Image: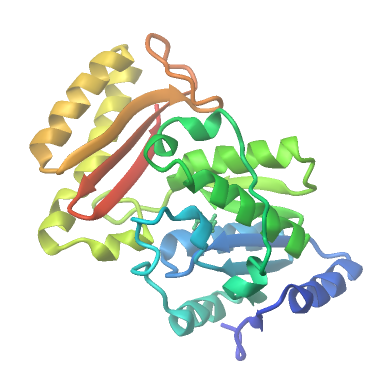
């Protein structure tokens, strides 16, 4: 554990001063973009970054442009002191904590839109979400000038969108996916899990069980549509209020898949009360 904790930078200029020094010393620099409320899933991203790169920046910014008006921007969990303590324990080098005025100054007018990948799965019910993500992530990449960026596979569609954007816009950064971290009962770690009541928390692990069941069925030769029919029935009886989607798609293109299981991934989004839970698994 470091004695002093990470350097805290609240402006782009302050962050860049440190990055310039590190690069002048020949060090690889990683960036881990987050919205704070750090849990073990985020910490796994930091550890993966530390394995590859000498210096690690963690950005903490609850990005307003990726929330629609009716979504949980105001309620989103925030806790700067607790987050910094966790980063100190890991020995992260720098925490970038910009204000909204630093990221979106008056007159800000640009939106980064990645076509195709953003129009399916989560993009159907959250049409502004991925534009906000792509915009803020492209800014964080340009601001940090990091060599590598680490994203959790829990938000697999987000990882694909960011990787596409980086390729399309020639941003000089390598996007690295990190496997989902789960609770002991299989529930994927998420900052939104704190919203779940005790009863909802008891239902939530069914998501992973259903995804695993579908992956096993498909690996044994069942078609995607048969696996989806089974999975829908299992989710219905588990007690979710609504299934937003349950789909099998190609892990690179997100195109629907039926017969073949090569490169297939199962994706799910469900709702319980106000809380939306997503997960995905490779077949
Ligand atoms: O995954 C998240 O926490 C956010 O979407 C990200 C990548 C930090 C952009 O705001």
Q: Quadrant of the N terminus?
A: bottom right
Q: Is residue 188 above or below residue 39?
A: above
Outermost residue to the front: 107
Whether residue 92 sits left or right of residue 173 in the image: it is left
Q: Residue at x 62, y 90 (%)?
A: 4
Q: Quadrant of the C terminus?
A: top left
Please name whichever residue, 145 or 91, is drawn nearer the observer in this view of the structure. Answer: 145
Q: Position of residue 281 (x, y in %)?
A: 39, 35
Outermost residue to the right: 24
Q: Residue at x 30, y 32 (%)?
A: 245
Q: Position of residue 145 (x, y in %)?
A: 78, 60
Q: Residue at x 54, y 58 (%)?
A: 45
Q: Is residue 190 above or below residue 119?
A: below
The answer, for residue 223, to whether it is visible in the render is yes
Q: Residue at x 27, y 66 (%)?
A: 194
The answer, for residue 179, to whether it is visible in the render is no
Please name whichever residue, 42 or 102, is drawn nearer the observer in this view of the structure. Answer: 102
Q: Position of residue 10 (x, y in %)?
A: 66, 79
Q: Residue 265 sits in which quadrant?
A: top left
Q: Is residue 55 above or below residue 256?
A: below
Whether residue 89 sits left or right of residue 245 in the image: it is right
């Amino acid at each position: 554990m470091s004695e002093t904790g990470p350097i805290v930078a609240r402006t782009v200029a302050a962050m860049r001063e440190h990055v310039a020094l590190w690069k002048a010393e020949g060090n690889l620099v990683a960036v881990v973009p987050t919205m704070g409320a750090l849990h073990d899933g985020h910490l796994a991203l930091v550890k993966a970054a530390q394995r590859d790169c000498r210096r690690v920046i963690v950005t903490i910014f609850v990005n307003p442009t990726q929330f629609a008006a009716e979504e949980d921007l105001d309620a989103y969990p925030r806790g700067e002191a607790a987050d910094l303590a966790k980063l100190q324990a890991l020995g992260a080098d720098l925490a970038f904590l910009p204000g909204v005025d630093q990221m979106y100054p008056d007159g800000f007018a640009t939106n980064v839109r990645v076509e195709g990948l953003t129009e399916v799965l989560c993009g159907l019910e959250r049409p502004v979400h991925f534009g906000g993500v792509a915009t803020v992530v492209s800014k964080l990449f340009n601001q940090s000038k990091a060599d590598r960026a680490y994203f959790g596979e829990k938000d697999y569609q987000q990882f694909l969108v960011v990787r596409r954007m980086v390729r399309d816009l020639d941003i000089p950064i390598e996007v690295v996916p990190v496997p989902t971290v789960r609770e002991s009962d299989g529930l994927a770690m998420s900052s939104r899990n704190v919203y779940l009541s005790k009863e909802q928390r008891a239902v939530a692990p069914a998501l992973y069980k259903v995804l695993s069941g579908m992956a096993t069925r498909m690996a044994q030769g069942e078609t995607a549509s048969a696996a989806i029919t089974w999975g829908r029935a299992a989710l219905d009886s588990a007690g979710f209020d609504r299934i937003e989607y349950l789909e099998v798609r190609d892990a690179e293109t997100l195109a629907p898949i039926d017969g073949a299981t090569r490169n297939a991934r199962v994706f799910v989004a469900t709702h319980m009360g106000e809380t939306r839970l997503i997960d995905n698994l490779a077949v």
